Image (cartoon, helix red, strand yellow):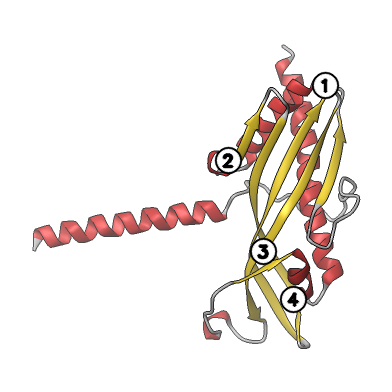
Amino acid sequence: MKKIFILLVVLIGISQALMAQGDKSQKVWNEDFKSVNDTAYVKSIAENGDATMLLEIDMPASKLYRYCREWFATKYTSYKESVQLEDNDNGKLIINCKYPVYFKGQYKNDPITMDGVETFKLTCDFKDGRFRIKATEYLVQYKVYFDKFPRDMQMSNSPLTNNYFQAKDASGKPELYELDYRSVLSGMIASMKKYITAADKDDDF
């Protein structure tokens, strides 16, 4: 009986550890980058979700690369698992990113909530005095909840996986959905700029 109890305790511990690991992978960002008032860095977004951002800072490419890599490692809890390429010699970083998505919209005139995770790839290219970030391969996985029913009464179905255009259409408010995504990307760049400036001052001692 004692052995069975110990085995159960071990199994419960393993289960909780796996659940915690899963939760950690979902809670990727340590801060919320969304800021509706800060979308200046994103000039346009293609129908598939591709976007390009450019940031000019008077620093050598090697410094910009190092500080941006530090920013990802600081803000992104799963950086080691998510980095696809680190090329200091050629000034290139490629990171597979996740961000929680929570959006209120409509489905057939009924109020709904879309709740899930959006993923996209960020490719960062560095040159002296500036760097460019491209967001590509946008996908979102989410569940739709009807707001007029409590969540515990709703059917538990598999999450929907859509590209950017489909997710916008499903939200019922494509303009607001695009603004939401634009705010995430632009907020990330603003956060990078703030970190780079502070890190460079901190290095000057």
Which residue is painted at 80% across and 20% down in the image?
A: 60
Q: Which amino acid does label 2 sit on?
A: Tyr
Q: Which quadrant does the N terminus fall into?
A: bottom left
Q: Is residue 99 above or below residue 144?
A: above
Q: Which amino acid does label 4 sit on?
A: Ala
- Which numbered tag is attached to residue 59? 1
Task: Determine crowd level at label 3: few under 14, some 14-19, many 20+ residues with C-alpha closer than 10 A.
Answer: many
Which residue is labeled 3 in the image? 140
Q: Nearer the viewer, residue 47 or 37?
A: 47
Task: Determine crowd level at label 4: few under 14, some 14-19, many 20+ residues with C-alpha closer than 10 A.
Answer: some
Q: Which of marks 1 and 3 is nearer the N terminus?
A: 1
Q: Which marked residue is nearer to the observer: mark 1 or mark 3?
A: 3
Alpha carbons under labels 4 and 3: distance apart: 11 Å
Q: Is mark 4 on a helix, strand or loop?
A: helix
Which residue is painted at 66% across and 32% down in the image?
A: 69
Alpha carbons under labels 4 and 1: distance apart: 43 Å
Q: Earlier in the sequence, mark 4 or mark 3?
A: 3
Task: Determine crowd level at label 1: few under 14, some 14-19, many 20+ residues with C-alpha closer than 10 A.
Answer: some
Determine contact: label 4, label 1, CB under 8 Å.
Answer: no
Alpha carbons under labels 2 and 1: distance apart: 24 Å
Which residue is labeled 4 in the image? 170
From the top left corner, tell me how far across and down residue 119 is, in percent. 66, 56
- Which numbered tag is attached to residue 79? 2
From the top left corner, tell me how far across and down residue 32 is, in percent. 70, 51
From the top left corner, tell me how far across and down residue 108 is, in percent. 76, 88
